[in-house]
Image: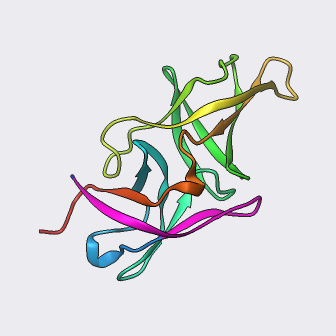
């Protein structure tokens, strides 16, 4: 496992997309679906990669789905835009402020790692289920540098 360090070129966060562009690419060992970190937390994955740049899809992007853990349970977290994500139909209430962990993913992430914190926990339309709203642990608008986990770095 290795790491690639990159500078953020641009950040776009709104209701339609949540992405950033970085100044590292395929020539630096980057590949689609690699995890991207900022402030010791997962912020997204590589969505597209060129020779010397890449687009990072933040976990809050409406097209993002990332496997996460709440305690000992596995869930799928869906980005909903505006710097938020949602975990739907949880069978128990989760405390606001609780950490959400990105699940271990062979070939991409060796250990679970913090991805966000619970911002809201509200009853679902089903009376026994909860919808969890998750926000990043860092201020992504102010991120200037990121780290990409490169599981099989080039020699």
Q: Position of residue 118 (x, y in %)?
A: 64, 29
Residue found 33% across the figure and 68% down from its top: 30
66 is higher (above) or lower (below) than 69: below
Residue found 39% across the figure and 42% down from its top: 40
Q: Can residue 34 be seen by looking at this rendering?
A: no
Residue found 41% across the figure and 50% down from its top: 37
135 is higher (above) or lower (below) than 90: below
Drawn side of residue 36 relative to residue 132, left or right: left
Give the total number of marks visible in the rendering. 0
Q: Position of residue 76 (x, y in %)?
A: 59, 40
Q: Position of residue 52 (x, y in %)?
A: 36, 81
Residue found 54% across the figure and 66% down from its top: 20
Residue range corresponding to the magenta coloring: 2-21
Question: Which quadrant is home to the C terminus?
Answer: bottom left
Q: Quadrant of residue 151?
A: bottom left
Q: Quadrant of residue 121?
A: top right
Drawn side of residue 84 relative to residue 30, left or right: right
47 is higher (above) or lower (below) than 77: below
Is residue 27 one of those drawn in magenta? no
């Amino acid at each position: 496992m290795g790491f690639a360090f990159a500078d953020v070129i641009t950040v776009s966060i709104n209701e339609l997309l949540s992405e950033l562009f970085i100044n590292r690419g395929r020539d630096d060992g980057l590949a689609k679906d690699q995890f991207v970190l900022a402030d010791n937390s997962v912020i997204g994955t590589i969505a597209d990669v060129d020779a010397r740049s890449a687009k990072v899809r933040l976990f809050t992007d409406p097209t993002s789905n990332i496997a996460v853990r709440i305690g000992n349970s596995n869930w799928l977290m869906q980005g909903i835009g505006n710097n938020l994500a949602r975990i739907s139909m949880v069978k128990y209430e989760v405390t606001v402020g609780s950490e959400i962990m990105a699940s271990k993913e062979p070939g991409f992430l060796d250990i679970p790692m913090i991805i966000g914190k619970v911002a809201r926990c509200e009853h679902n339309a089903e009376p026994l289920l909860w919808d969890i709203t998750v926000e990043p642990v860092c201020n992504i608008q102010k991120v200037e540098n990121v780290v990409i986990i490169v599981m099989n770095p080039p020699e």
